[in-house]
Amino acid sequence: MEDLYNHLKELEETLLQPETRKSLESLQNLLAPSFFEVGSSGEVLYKEGITTENIGVVDMTLSDFEIHPLSKEVVLTTFTIDNHLKQQRSLRSSIWKHMNGNWMMVFHQGTIAKETYKENRREL
């Protein structure tokens, strides 16, 4: 489980890197064909609508990362993002699916927050 945790965290962090966000090929390799996102702005973005201009380069830090396996091939990740340019914190979640030997993101959502995920979290 630790290997999966580290791998998915690395993939999430890769999606924040300028070299990834400037490369449509890199993005295409990480996002499933059916990928869509509900951004913290409330805007919905589909994979076919992604360009290097509309996602842009960001200065963000990921923290409070957790994985929640939903099946052998599907995992929900949850984490906090601090956007240093906008001075804004958001709670994030992604669904990753193991497809053709690779983990690919099928869904992502960001919600603006005042606290970190860890601070908001309640024990189940």
Image (cartoon, grey):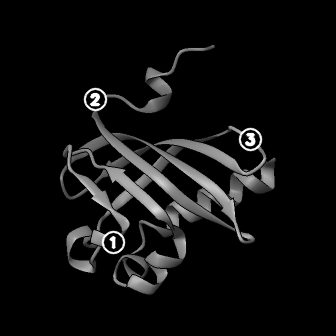
> x, y (%) of residue 16?
41, 66
The circle drawn on residue 4 is: none
**Type of residue at label 2?**
Lys
> x, y (%) of residue 94?
50, 48
The CA span between labels 3 and 1 is 27 Å
The answer to whether 48 appears left or right of 122 in the picture is left
As helix, strand or loop, the secondary structure at mark 1 comes to helix
Q: Residue at x 79, y 50 (%)?
A: 2
Of tags 2 and 3, which is closer to the observer?
A: 3
Determine contact: label 3, label 1, CB under 8 Å. Answer: no
Q: Earlier in the sequence, mark 3 or mark 1?
A: 1
The circle drawn on residue 71 is: 3
Q: Is residue 117 above or below residue 11?
A: above
The answer to whether 113 appears left or right of 98 in the picture is left
As helix, strand or loop, the secondary structure at mark 3 comes to loop
Q: Earlier in the sequence, mark 1 or mark 2?
A: 1
The answer to whether 43 appears left or right of 36 in the picture is left
**Type of residue at label 3?**
Ser
> x, y (%) of residue 42?
20, 43
The circle drawn on residue 48 is: 1
**Type of residue at label 1?**
Glu
Q: Is residue 50 above or below residue 91?
A: below
Q: Residue at x 51, y 63 (%)?
A: 13
Q: Residue at x 46, y 61 (%)?
A: 34
Write down the quadrant of residue 23 in the picture. Answer: bottom left
The circle drawn on residue 114 is: 2
Relative depth, front residue between 118 and 41 = 41
Q: Quadrant of the C terminus?
A: top right
Label 2 crowd bin: few (<14), some (14–19), many (20+), radius 10 Å = few
The CA span between labels 1 and 2 is 32 Å
As helix, strand or loop, the secondary structure at mark 2 comes to loop
Label 1 crowd bin: few (<14), some (14–19), many (20+), radius 10 Å = few
